[in-house]
Amino acid sequence: MHDEHDLIAGLKAGSRDSFSRLFRIWYRDLVMFGGNFLPGEREACEDVVQSVFLKLWNDRRAIDITSSLRSYLLGAVRNGCLDELRHRDVVREHEAYVQAASVAGELDTENCVLYSDLQRHLLAALERIPRPCREAFEMNRFEGLKYREIAVRLHLSERTVEVRIARAIELLKMHMKEYLTHGRRRG
């Protein structure tokens, strides 16, 4: 009925006719074979077989069929079905993870909003602190400088830096008090 070697040679040469003939000869049998791995899921089997033929066409020039075309196609369909099953497992695991984490995810989203809200309030409170205290505090907390390094940079004693930072913290607590006690109760 057909010469397999001629069809493969035609496929490698880019013959659409050879490809169409291969498709017509093998499609139905391959879909049925896929049913062994995906029972009762004809549409999924058809998708796998169509993917196998698409790959066969796309890779036609480089394809190296060492066994029979039948063995090659059956192996490709088997692998495609197993890939589909693995993919479904990954999807199920991901869905379970998303479901389990949905409450935590909502909390994480709320915490992100609260963090940005806190940042905004902190920056506003910092603006209300006297410049010398704010400057020492920002160098310590935002730039990571030690009291000694700040003292050198500002030409002050370490004790003065310590007092300024302590005063900044005291004022921040005062300015942030309303946010910290009422701001978190939202929602």
Image (spheres, grey):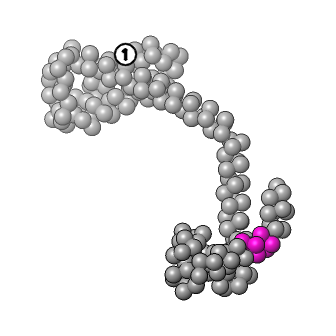
Mark 1 sits on what residue? 29
Measuring from the top left, give residue 6's x and y in whole percent: 14, 23
The residue lying toward the viewer, choosing from 66 and 109, is 109
Indicate left or right for 173 with 86 as reference.
right
Residue 166 visible in the shown view? yes
Label 1 environment density (alpha carbons within 10 Å; few <14, some 14–19, many ≥20): few
Q: Quadrant of residue 164?
A: bottom right
Q: Residue at x 55, y 80 (%)?
A: 151
| Quadrant of res 31 | top left
Give the residue type at disc 1. Asp
Instruction: State yes or no: residue 117 in magenta.
Output: no
Question: Residue at image x 51%, y 28%?
Answer: 88
Quadrant in which the C terminus appears: bottom right
x 27%, y 37%: residue: 58
The correct choice, above or below, for 43 with respect to 70 in the image is below
Q: Can residue 143 be seen in the rendering of this structure? A: no
Viewer-proximal residue among 88 and 22: 88
**82 above or below 170?**
above
**Residue 70: percent from the left, percent from the top?**
26, 16
Residue 184 image position (x, y, % from top left) = 80, 58
99 vs 65: above or below? below
64 or 31: nearer the viewer:
64
Residue 41 is situated, as x and y percent measured from the top left of the image, at: 52, 20
Q: Is residue 168 left or right of residue 161?
A: right
Q: Residue at x 66, y 85 (%)?
A: 131
Q: Does residue 171 show up magenta in the picture?
A: yes
Residue 74 in the figure: left or right of residue 39: left
The N terminus appears in which quarter of the rendering? top left
Say what secondary structure mark 1 lies in: helix
Q: State which region is magenta.
A: 169-176
Main SS, magenta region, reads helix
